Amino acid sequence: AFTLRNTAFVDEGCYLFSGHSEWVRLFGGPSPDTDYPSYFSGSPYLYPLIGAVATGVGGLTAARALSLAFMLGATIMLYRATALIFNRRAGVLAGAAFAFSGPALFMSHLATFDAPAVFLLATGLWFALRSADNKVLFLEATGAVVLAIAFKYAALVYAIPIVAITAIVAIPRVGWRWAAAR
């Protein structure tokens, strides 16, 4: 059984080690011997640093608990986005379907780039849905999605539907020309 007490997966170990190496470098120590930006699937200056802090506080369990917190946050944001479009019942069903899906459960158990990227994408979606009436929320949606892409470069694929949803939601309120320009 996969629990939070087993040894680190290769990616987890690499990300967390690189985070500790970067913290050492930031505080005047030697630079890491490895060129992490050349092969990481996300910025080596975001999640690895956050994960290293979590590992410093509570070991691998804390880093994995951080991923669990990000995935719970993504579930909440998915609930809120779905409830905003449809109703609370649909939000609960969407949140439950997401929370108990295999990929969500798997990502919540690993200290990798994936969980914060999914959380930021879900947050960006929620801000995007609410942005038709508020330009500040549009900027927050953009910021969340850009940060998600920085956490995991593959999140760019999921940013495109969020942009499309933003435009579609804005059409009834501001017209198709302004929505398309946005």
Image (spheres, rainbow, N blue to C red):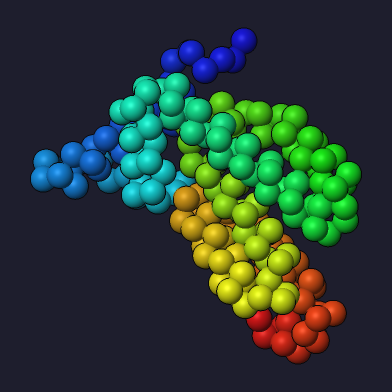
Q: Quadrant of residue 54?
A: top left
Q: At x 68% / y 59%, what residue is drawn?
A: 125
Which quadrant of the figure contains the N terminus?
top right
Q: In the rendered view, would you say 6 is above or below 147?
A: above
Position in image of residue 110 (x %, y %): 52, 29
Camera-side residue of 60 and 8:
60
Position in image of residue 47 (x %, y %): 41, 43
Q: Quadrant of residue 85?
A: bottom right
Q: In the rendered view, would you say 129 is above or below 175?
A: above
Left/right placement of residue 78 relative to residue 64 reads right
Q: At x 61% / y 38%, what residue is drawn?
A: 71
Q: At x 65% / y 56%, what residue is drawn?
A: 158
Position in image of residue 161 (x %, y %): 71, 62
Left/right placement of residue 129 relative to residue 120 reads right
Camera-side residue of 94 and 92:
92
Q: In the rendered view, would you say 179 is above or below 93?
A: below
Question: Tag count in the figure?
Answer: 0
